[in-house]
Image: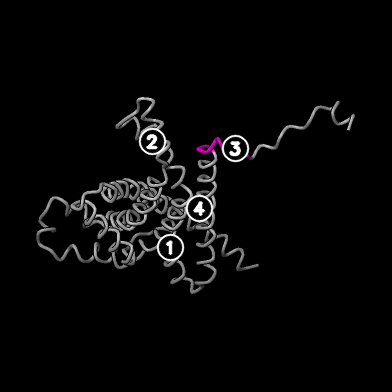
Amino acid sequence: MTDLRFIAETILSLLSGVPLTLQLSALANIGGILLGFVIASMRLSGTAALYAPAWLYIQIIRSTPLLVLMFLIYYGLSQFTAIRTSLLWPVLREPYWCAVLALVINSSGYAAEIIRGGLLSVGRNEIEAARACGMSGRLLLRRIIIPLAVRQALPAYSNEMVAMVKATSLASLVTLMDVTGIATSIASSTYRPIAVFVAAGVIYLTINGVLARAVKVLEYRLTPHLRQADTPPPLPPKSILEHS
């Protein structure tokens, strides 16, 4: 009973770190999508000068642990005089922006492949039909290719969004007091790490549960043709049932 009360009190204390966790995950996902779209477009360009750097970028980022990437940015960039004297230094010397940059870069490597798969899933028949209706260029991209690609990529990218929420816990290693950072501080002062991190796990579980539900609702709204398949067929008229 004492542990349950302590866990409840710890959860209330950890709530102060939730806004930072949400900020980091939101910026990481938004930045990862934008950068990933650029990288995916480069891979699909058909030009070797664009395809090769994009392929190499994806291989390096997907093969590098996020913790290593975060340490390289937070501790490594300050070793270069050119960085310390540049206009970017006021930003790169802040732990918050170093964590955001590491999360965005890490997310973009996975997002690029998910987006590329979504774009490749758009059938040639849909594109040809749109062109026959007079669509081309940006209109074709905005009205046909992107909506269809989003429908295909959203289920896969929802896993990346959930993983990025959990990945924000590494930001505590660069002095940011998110949920995990506060939990570590409480655990070191109370010597009750199990109860503290159980409380942290409850918060992450809640955040990811709400996020997964939101993505499910969005996926449902983006697929009206599938909603019709889920609707049960209407019952036959009463007169037919009576004769049968």
Q: Which residue is mark 4?
A: 207
Q: Nearer the viewer, mark 4 or mark 2?
A: 2
Q: Earlier in the sequence, mark 1 or mark 3?
A: 1
The local crowd at label 2, few if under 14, some if 14 to 19, many if 20 or more residues have their Cα within 10 Å, is some
- Residues under labels 3 and 4: Cα distance? 27 Å
Residue contact at pointers 4 and 2, CB within 8 angstroms: no
Secondary element at image label 1: helix
Give residue 96's position: percent from left, percent from top.
30, 55
Could you tell me how far apart the alpha carbons at marks 1 and 2 are, in whole angstroms?
47 Å
**Residue 30, horizontal then vertical, whole percent:** 36, 46
- Label located before the other in sequence (1 or 2): 2
Residue indicated by mark 1? 180
The numbered disc on residue 127 is 2
N-terminal-most mark, 4 or 2: 2
Q: CA distance from mark 1 to mark 3?
A: 39 Å
Q: Which residue is labeled 3 in the image?
A: 227
Asked if residue 228 is among those painted magenta in the image, a careful observer would answer yes
Of residue 141 and residue 95, the one placed in the foreground of this image is 141
Q: Of the residues under marks 2 and 3, which one precedes in the sequence?
A: 2
